[in-house]
Image (cartoon, coloured by chain):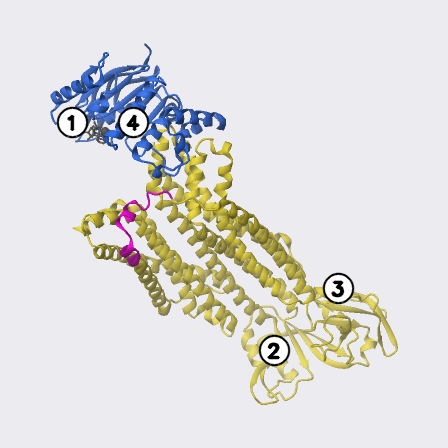
Amino acid sequence: MFTKLALRNVRRQIGNYLIYFITVSLTVALLFAVNNIIFGDEIAKFAQGMTEMRTGLAGFVVFIALIVAFVLSYATSFMLRLRKREFGTYLTLGMTRKNILTIFVFETAIICLIAMGIGLVLGLFIYQGLMAIFMHLLNMEFAISAYSMNGMLFTIALVTGIFIISSVASALYLKKVSIYDLIHGDKKVEKSVKHPLVWLIITVLTLVVCICSIAVFYWSVDEIMMKGMNANYLFLSLFAFAGSMILFHVALSKSLVYVLMKRKRFCSRGTHIFVLRQLSAVLGSNALMIGLLAFLLSFSVIAANVCFVQKAMQELSLNQNCPYDIVYSDNLYSTGDTGKVPLPQAEEVIESYKHIEAKYPYALYTTGKNDFYRNTRWSGEGYAGLTDSFMSVSDFNAVTQPLGFDPVVLNDTYLIVANLPEITDYDWENFTFTWKEQDYKYGGVTREYPSLAYMYFYVVVPDAAVEDMKKEVSYMAYDITDGEYDAASLRQALSYTVEREDGAETYERTDFRFREYSRQQENATSAILVVGALFAAAIFLFMAMAILALKTLSGLSDDKKRYQILYRLGTGEKEQGRTLFAQTFTFFLTPFAACILISVPTAMIIKHIITLSGMAVLQWQIYGIAASIAGVMTLIYILYYAATYMIAKKAVVHR
Amino acid sequence: MKEILKIQNVVKYYGNGSVVIKALDGISFSVAKGEFVAIMGASGSGKSTLLNVIATIDRASAGEIYIGGKQISAMREEALSAFRRDALGFVFQEYNLLDTLTIGENIALPLYLKKVGHDRAERELQRVAQALDIGDQLQKFPYELSGGQRQRAACARAIITDPSLILADEPTGALDSKNSKGLMQTFQKMHTALGSTLLMVTHDPVVGSYADRLLFLKDGKIWSEVLRGGRSRQEMHREILSVTAALGGEADVY
Ligand SMILES: Nc1ncnc2c1ncn2[C@@H]1O[C@H](COP(=O)(O)OP(=O)(O)OP(=O)(O)O)[C@@H](O)[C@H]1O
Ligand SMILES: [Mg+2]
């Protein structure tokens, strides 16, 4: 008999069940997709060797799983709250608490099972979609990716675990709660916020802290990149930002209505006071949730920006770091290497992969002194053995001209070449370099050239100057025929084992740098980053919307009565619609608005960092990325909001 | 005397297809300005339906309704809402007040909806709160009040806009006899001191005895009419009891 009762109830609240169902299905789908990626070997193949990435990935999944768990348990508790009154009625009819619990758990289990089935199927598609993006980012042919059994089992285990936990929570609640609370618990208006003035002050303070932390972050990026300060302030400002972002939204939720309510004239127009009172209840009691959502949404915005900019900058940074297809550097000081391939032999190996079109030899020399380094912060303790490096102007011109640079002319002057921005901060103009009784005057400091040697900086001098210096490293830059090739295996072929002097360990090394290999590595990194960011953004966005929608819709049965009263008092259909819009949109907007605004400082900081790191940035590109991310997120948000609004409107507005 | 409400041949059907219920079956009457009219009848006789049709929250299937000379059955939806807001006041049996608003905000809400401005709304609020003796409860929320106090607040809200017609559907339905007596005194005060025109549905003969005139409904038709004509409440009460006995016997007798 009770099963019949329960079934009828399901039919009556089909809308709410549908929302619960969709929420569970989608969370399962997203979870399954990410687990497939983690447990499958597609991405693992690319992440191989990148241990940091692996740990990062694992941490990321745990983070996502926690959040998904939160949404699922929230959705389940939503179901319980939805049916409080019904359970109360059952109790008064003489049903035992155990009976009710059995019905509830049984019902939710069935819904969860079906939702899990659908979620798993849906997850397969989402996974394929993500893999398609991933493969596209790697410039690889998309093939249907294999599913991972472990991923599926892990997903099922996770969802079951979450279900059991929330069932236990429901059981504990049902065991303790009084019948009166079940039946009348939701009749009482949610308590009004205590100490709204304090919250208002906190709102203002945290806003200030938030803005300050962004400023400190900006400044500490400068300090780190220009003066090599440690990153303490950077982390501090990040923590301050996260904390103040959460607290700001908590405080805002608690004080926003209070501020508006103080404006009597505003309150006494139309349905304003009604909207404010509605919001006061829902915002005040969900302040912490709104704070968390705001944090996750800003995380999504920032992560998406960083990842997409990284992707966009990849080509630029490749040109910067690997201007030539292959660069050989012979470290003359390394000894005891076995299996080191002699250069002519190595070139034959290269030829077997790709034809060498041109070779550009160049070298670095040293005086054994630190005349230049002495003027920088790379001197003194910790930099004891560091000596200046020099390149002859003819070598320099020979290797830079093919890259499209004009030849440099030095008339007893020197030119400092570096990528680090701080190099220009030192007083070089009054510094004269003397070598073998010859004075070389300041001829410039430049950051324009791509990196040809891996030094903090080197000094280009007239050819005559290096004649008496000791050769430090000789390089050979190669131009090979265009097109892709198996850089990884070429790199492997030119690697050799190095034995440490103490004989403790051996390690693989190669004296070559392969542009193609770096490109592939960076591709894999940015593919993982982009897919990860997309995924995180999707999950957080979805989660925020699901929670907001569940919250809005679960209040509908009460709202229905309230709107009926408004209707009787002469509020027309249109005005009811406007009122509902103001009420629900403000609720949706509260955790979202600031997060979208975060796009602006994020883009500014990213642009700043890239400028500092010596790459020419296309300003519009960074702002364009920020704008598109904000745009897409807003669009999804609006669509979701519109759906919620339509459902609510249908349920609530009286005609 | 000026006619506030005029109803002609109003018919109301519920349902469609095979099962059709005729809730109102050709009802005609009118209410003059300042009158206090009660509608009585057995459960299911069509009292609430009649009130809802007059209140413009339900539409009649046929017939004409004039309020203040305006034919409401011809009005469009948005115009009806504005009409309800400006010309009518309501007291219902339950769910009268918005639980999220304070009593003061609840009472002043019709004025807010009319956008009369803060100062005037505040003035009117003080006026009706004083008249109905609820001035010290304006800051409270409905759940902090008793059922009788809530109904009084609903009355205050019904009169705050000075509507040409106040409609009440079993306003004492949820109250005990002491509280319903208090509420009826409130109604009488509204009627005599403030000159409100009242149309009230009740099935309580004691409550009905406060009215100037009583209409008895049976099966959607006006079955009989009782006029006070200067009689005392006790005499009215006795007459009502005899009419209800004749009406169907099983009517509620308190
Ligand atoms: N929305 C509706 N749909 C179908 N039938 C309805 C509807 N509302 C009322 N009725 C029917 O119309 C008739 C009159 O109902 P109404 O609510 O007007 O009675 P009432 O006199 O107010 O009774 P009570 O004293 O119990 O409140 C009843 O037979 C009822 O079943
Ligand atoms: Mg009724």
- Which kind of residue does numbered mark 2 sit on? Glu
Query: Which quarter of the figure has residue B61?
Result: top left
Quickly name the residue at label 2: A351
Q: CA distance from mark 3 to mark 4?
A: 87 Å
Secondary-structure class at tag 4: helix
Parent chain of label 3:
A
Density class for disc 4 (Cα within 10 Å; few <14, some 14-19, many ≥20) is: many
Residue A112 visible in the snapshot? no
Q: Is residue B61 visible?
A: yes
The numbered mark 1 sits on a residue in which chain?
A: B
Quarter of the rendering occupied by the N terminus of chain B: top left
Q: What is the secondary structure assignment of the residue under circle 1?
A: loop
List the residue tagged with mark 4.
B183
Chain A display color: yellow
Residue B253: image tag: 1
Using the image, name the chain to which the residue with label 4 belongs.
B
Q: Amino acid at mark 1?
A: Val
